[in-house]
Image: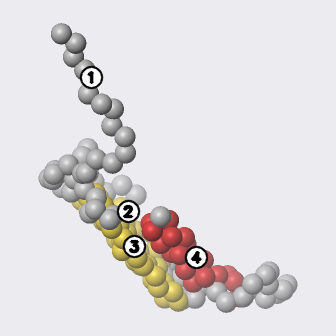
């Protein structure tokens, strides 16, 4: 529940930062909403039992340039961190991960730095688990 509330709050902050101060449609010839305005937002959340961590930060300078990052770490130590820039030179990202099946590569102006997975203790079990079958002798 806390995660949903933080997610909705983050979305609202982004919308407010990007679309500014007014309500309704602008009058003809008036294009306030097309002009970027400076903004900054972010959040860090973690599961109640340490089973995950997520983070996100982003800021814009009001000239159409945006920098940010987001990432997560799960209960097994699998992680991904994405740092990005969007400006007059396009979108560029650097990704650091230890996700299984990834390898270092650079497709489409994205630098992907894969590292070997180091698995930690298993995550706590939640939810329903079927009982073990009974043996009849």
Q: CA distance from mark 4 to mark 1?
A: 49 Å
Q: Which one is earlier in the sequence, the residue at label 2 or at label 4? A: 4
Determine the residue positioned at 38% across, 62% down. 109
Q: CA distance from mark 3 to mark 2?
A: 21 Å
Query: Would you call the spot at circle 1 few (<14 residues within 10 Å), some (14-19), or many (20 or more)?
Result: few
Query: Would you call the spot at circle 4 few (<14 residues within 10 Å), some (14-19), or many (20 or more)?
Result: few
Secondary structure of residue under mark 2:
loop
Q: CA distance from mark 2 to mark 4?
A: 30 Å
Task: Residue under label 2, please give it.
Answer: 109
Mark number displayed over residue 56: 3
107 on left or right of 3: left
Total labels: the figure holds 4
Of the residues tagged 1 and 3, which is closer to the observer? 1
Q: CA distance from mark 2 to mark 1?
A: 53 Å
Q: CA distance from mark 1 to mark 3?
A: 44 Å
Of the residues tagged 3 and 2, which is closer to the observer? 3
Dot 1 and dot 3 residues touching (CB under 8 Å): no
When asked about the image quadrant of residue 46, the answer is bottom left
Of the residues tagged 4 and 3, which is closer to the observer? 4
- Name the residue furthest front: 137
Q: Which one is earlier in the sequence, the residue at label 4 or at label 3? A: 4
Query: Would you call the spot at circle 3 few (<14 residues within 10 Å), some (14-19), or many (20 or more)?
Result: some
Task: Residue under label 1, please give it.
Answer: 133
Task: Residue under label 4, please give it.
Answer: 12
Q: Which one is earlier in the sequence, the residue at label 1 or at label 3? A: 3
């Amino acid at each position: 529940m806390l995660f949903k509330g933080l997610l909705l709050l983050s979305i609202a902050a982004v919308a407010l930062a990007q679309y500014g101060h007014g309500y309704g449609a602008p009058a003809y010839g008036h294009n306030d909403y097309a002009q970027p305005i400076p903004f900054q937002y972010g959040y860090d959340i973690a599961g109640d039992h340490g089973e995950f961590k997520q983070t996100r930060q982003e800021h814009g300078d009001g000239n159409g340039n945006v920098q940010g990052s987001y990432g997560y770490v799960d209960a097994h130590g699998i992680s991904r961190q994405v740092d990005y820039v969007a400006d007059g030179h396009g979108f560029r990202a650097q990704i650091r991960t230890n996700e299984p099946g990834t390898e270092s590569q650079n497709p489409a102006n994205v630098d992907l730095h894969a590292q070997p997975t180091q698995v930690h203790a298993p995550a706590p079990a939640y939810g329903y688990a079927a009982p073990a079958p009974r043996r009849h002798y």
